[in-house]
Image (tube, helix red, strand yellow):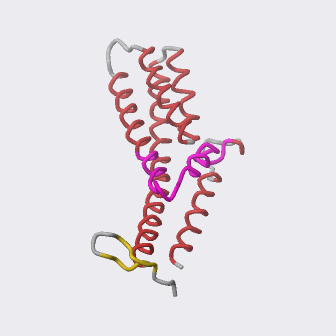
Amino acid sequence: MALSILKGLLQGYVQSLFDELRFGILKPDNAGIVNDQFSQIHTLKSEEEPEHVVQLIDKYFVDVETILSELTSKIDCPDVDFSKLSELAHKVDERSLSIGAKHVKLACVDLIESCDQMNKENFSRALIWIKNEFSHTRNKLEAYAQMERRIIRLKSKQQSSACVPSSSLGCLREVPEK
């Protein structure tokens, strides 16, 4: 019962990730924190690897945080290498595309354009925007990952209580559900 409720809550939460409007995003086609790529990743969940999606999200966080930190340190250099900044901005863009982080990807456009223009002021402004979008997306996806982990724990608990343990052999027989 609790598992089905939690799954329903997760489904509603995922839908809210697609529907959320953000300040400054006026076009309805740009609504949503995530896009269809996130749905594709969401379908990768399997019984064999229930935490696969959560691990992909965690890896995305680590990768993008590292790149944003590097971008921040490089813009403060006296001789800014915009080609290196552009390369890093494209990495954020690619990772955001692969996970379906729609608003972070949208913010990457300005970051990449400012590199092409070699405009340090615009780059700094775009970097602030992308950090804000990433922070918001990370908060939303962390809540998603927390719900997924809770479901995985509940499933595991139900499976372990649905069998009679046998020394080190695992379950000897299934216990009928009540």
* 37 is within the stretch colored magenta: yes
On the image, the x and y values in percent for residue 54 come to 45, 52
Between 133 and 46, the one nearer to me in the picture: 46
Instruction: From the top left corner, tell me how far across and down residue 121 is, in percent.
Output: 46, 22
| Lateral position of residue 57 relative to residue 8, left or right | left
Provide the residue span drawn in magenta. Answer: 30-58
Rendering quarter of residue 70: top left
Q: Quadrant of residue 77?
A: top left
Asked whether 121 or 159 is in front, the reply is 159
The image quarter in which residue 24 lies: top right
Q: Picture coordinates of residue 134 (x, y %)?
A: 47, 41
Q: Position of residue 66 (x, y in %)?
A: 36, 34
- Image position of 35 with respect to 178: above or below: above
Q: Residue most toward the top?
A: 79
Q: Which residue appears farthest toward the left when viewing the image?
A: 167
Image quarter hosting the N terminus:
bottom right
Question: Relative to residue 65, is residue 108 drawn left or right?
Answer: right
